[in-house]
Amino acid sequence: NNDDYLPCDTVGYVRHLGELYQDDLGLPVTANADIVGPVGGFGWKLELLKGPPKSVRFEEVEVTDPSVPMLLSIAYPIGTTFTITAHAGWCRDDDDDDSANEYSCSHQFHSVDSVDKVRLSLGDAYHVDQETGVLTVRIIQTPKTFLGYNNNNKHHPDAAAAADWFLPTYDSIGKDGKGYALTRFERNGVRLPKYTRSNYIQLVASCETDDSDGVYCSELLQPYHDEPTTTSS
């Protein structure tokens, strides 16, 4: 939001991963960045000029084909640990009665031992390279009002195997069996994804900071080069 006409200084760059783009800075990133581009392939690399972010939120995600992975990599100081949590808007966990919660409203990501496993995951996995400190996470478009099904929810396609997280498609049914899980604009055979507000993925890193705002990790980063990896799309 730049209603006050404040300068939108470049704070970093984002580009495609892979040897073809190693000498390219990429697209400039400003505060409250709105990034648009293709998914699939090796993914995207985010690099901020003052260091990796201590905390970053991914929101207003739109993906034309949810089955095509969108990976994001950020280099962090070696030894950094992460808490990555998805949150659904318009959804409330009933802490007083867990049995009443038919839908999950938040979900914590888990660590896996390879980038390929992130790519093939349901969108709730991340990988940290122990030699370079590079974090890779898959970003997906989540429903606005729920993230998964709890307690044998009757609206789950397979109620006996209901899970508190799922990778939605444009055929996934919405909350309480109404409408669709992912919003869209559709007419005459043309479908456009529509982001929703208030649902987001929050990443928090354990790194040390030396700026007054505690925004950027201050520890030394290891140099690394993009390495080709297998890709399913």
Image: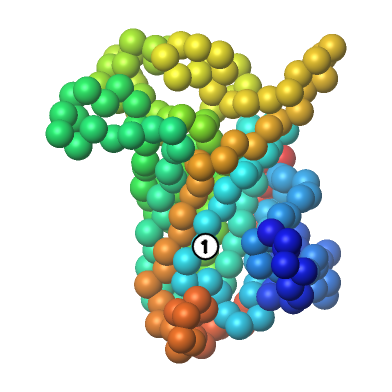
The image shows residue 46, relative to residue 65, as above or below, that is below
The residue shown at (42%, 64%) is 204
User: Is residue 89 or residue 113 the one in the foreground?
Assistant: 89
The residue shown at (18%, 24%) is 99
Q: In which quarter of the image is the N terminus?
A: bottom right
Q: Name the residue under label 1.
A: 56
Q: What element carries label 1?
A: strand
The residue shown at (62%, 51%) is 71
Percent of width and height locating residue 162: 34, 21
Q: Is residue 23 visible?
A: yes
From the viewer's perspective, is 37 left or right of 133?
A: right
Percent of width and height locating residue 202: 46, 55
Amino acid under disc 1: Val
Instruction: Name the outermost residue toward the left.
Output: 96
Q: Residues within 10 Å of mark 1 (few under 14, many from 20)?
A: some
Percent of width and height locating residue 23: 82, 75
User: Is residue 62 or residue 22 the one in the foreground?
Assistant: 62
The image shows residue 61, relative to residue 172, as above or below, that is below
